[in-house]
Image (cartoon, rainbow, N blue to C red):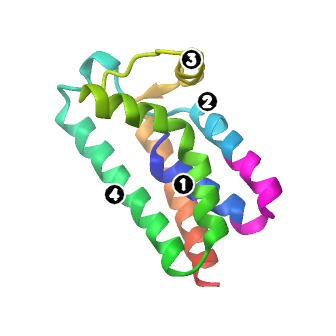
Amino acid sequence: MTATNHALSGALIGAFLPLPVAVPLAFMSHFILDALPHYGIARGLRDSSRSYRTIVLTDVCIALSIGLAAILFGKWRMEITGWVAYSPDITWVVQYARTRSLNLKDSNWFTRFHHRIQRYESQKGLFVELALFAALLPLFIMQILS
């Protein structure tokens, strides 16, 4: 699942629930979303695919913008739970920073588990990602502005 959809989902959990409940639910939401069909391509093609890199970069920029909006509007619970929902992917960010490769390896039990639940990752999953984004973004905007 994209960072954007993880961040939006987590932020919305934080908008409606108190932090002691929202934080663990936001974290769990990450794995629930990753178990759904979502965008991805074969690991061996990730470094050579310009479109994949463009989508990942665009996604990161949108996700950071969502976090910035939460900060600017003083919605700290939404900011915190948005980051918590995204946080399991930080292991991939660290690996990418070390190797400069999008062909991420399952180096420990956590990344192996995380990779295994993403069995419905495909290029067609982009449509699921876009539909989820279209559903979550208006809700996020309403909560930010309230």
Is residue 123 shown to the viewer in this render? no
Q: Which residue is drawn at 53% across and 15% down?
A: 108
Q: Identify the element where label 1 is drawn.
A: helix
With respect to residue 57, does 88 lie above or below? above
Q: Give the range drawn in magenta.
A: 15-26
With respect to residue 34, does 146 lie above or below? below
Q: Identify the element where label 2 is drawn.
A: helix
Q: Distance between the residues labelled 4 and 3?
A: 26 Å
Circle 4 crowding by C-alpha within 10 Å: few under 14, some 14–19, many from 20: some
Q: How far apart are marks 3 and 1 (CA)?
A: 21 Å
Q: Which residue was labeled with disc 3?
A: 116
Q: Spot the residue most to the front.
A: 98
Amino acid, disc 3:
Arg
Query: Is-magenta flag for residue 138?
Result: no
Whether pointer 3 and pointer 2 mark residues with C-beta atoms closer than 8 Å, the reply is no
Q: Which residue was labeled with disc 4?
A: 61
Q: Which residue was labeled with disc 1?
A: 7
Q: How far apart are marks 3 and 2 (CA)?
A: 9 Å
